[in-house]
Image: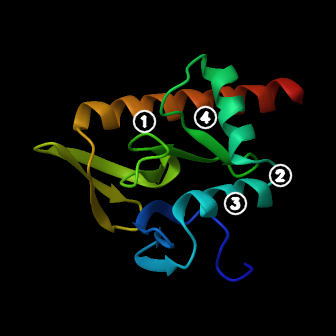
Amino acid sequence: MVNNLEISSKTCALSYKDEKSCTIIEGEKELNIEMPLQEFINYNCEYYGSSFEGRIKGSQIALGMKYKLPIVVEESRELIFFPTKAYNSESCCWISLNNISSYEGKNSTTLVTFNSGKKQTFEISLESFENQVLRATKLLLIVKTRKLESN
């Protein structure tokens, strides 16, 4: 891992910290990265062979939707992340589909338990969270189906 900047299968979530940095939940740890969240996501998309815009375009085509789309950050390990809000929102977080163990609604937020046991509350209603999980799961199914069809 170069400078601890690569999203991996252990990355649970990415969140905005301030204009110049973001926080990464990696297993049970939280890492602060001196890079704006959107730049960090774009860096990782490019590191794994595309751009953020390319990943969004791929999701638009696959899902036939345009708003708050999940993205495939890396195909072979099926690293799929979904946003909690619009991409350009300061309070947008990105959550790894594969690392969610369970979740529950708490007022207008959602408490997520990750596979590592770490718990994190996100500013997203349970209904919206479940909708995002369904979109990301549909994208994962499309990725898996395409892999099978190409073999």
Q: How many C-alpha atoms fall within 10 Å of the one at disc 2: few (<14), some, or many (≥20)? A: few
Q: Is residue 99 above or below residue 75?
A: below
Instruction: Say which residue appears at 49% left-offset and 27% top-offset.
Output: 67
Residue underneath mark 2: 49
Q: Are marks 4 and 2 in contact (CB under 8 Å)?
A: no
Q: The residue under label 4 is which amino acid type?
A: Leu
Q: Residue 7: x, y in percent?
A: 63, 64
Q: Residue 51: x, y in percent?
A: 75, 48
**Distance from label 4 to label 2 (Cα)?**
18 Å
Q: The residue under label 1 is which amino acid type?
A: Val
Q: Is residue 28 above or below residue 146?
A: below
The mark nearer the N terminus, 4 or 1, is 1
**Distance from label 3 to label 2 (Cα)?**
9 Å
Q: How many C-alpha atoms fall within 10 Å of the one at disc 1: few (<14), some, or many (≥20)? A: many
**Distance from label 4 to label 1 (Cα)?**
10 Å
> Residue 44: which disc?
3
Looking at this view, name the residue that lies furthest to the front. Answer: 19
Q: Nearer the viewer, residue 60 or 18?
A: 18
Q: How many C-alpha atoms fall within 10 Å of the one at disc 3: few (<14), some, or many (≥20)? A: many
Residue 8 in sight in this render: no
Residue underneath mark 4: 140
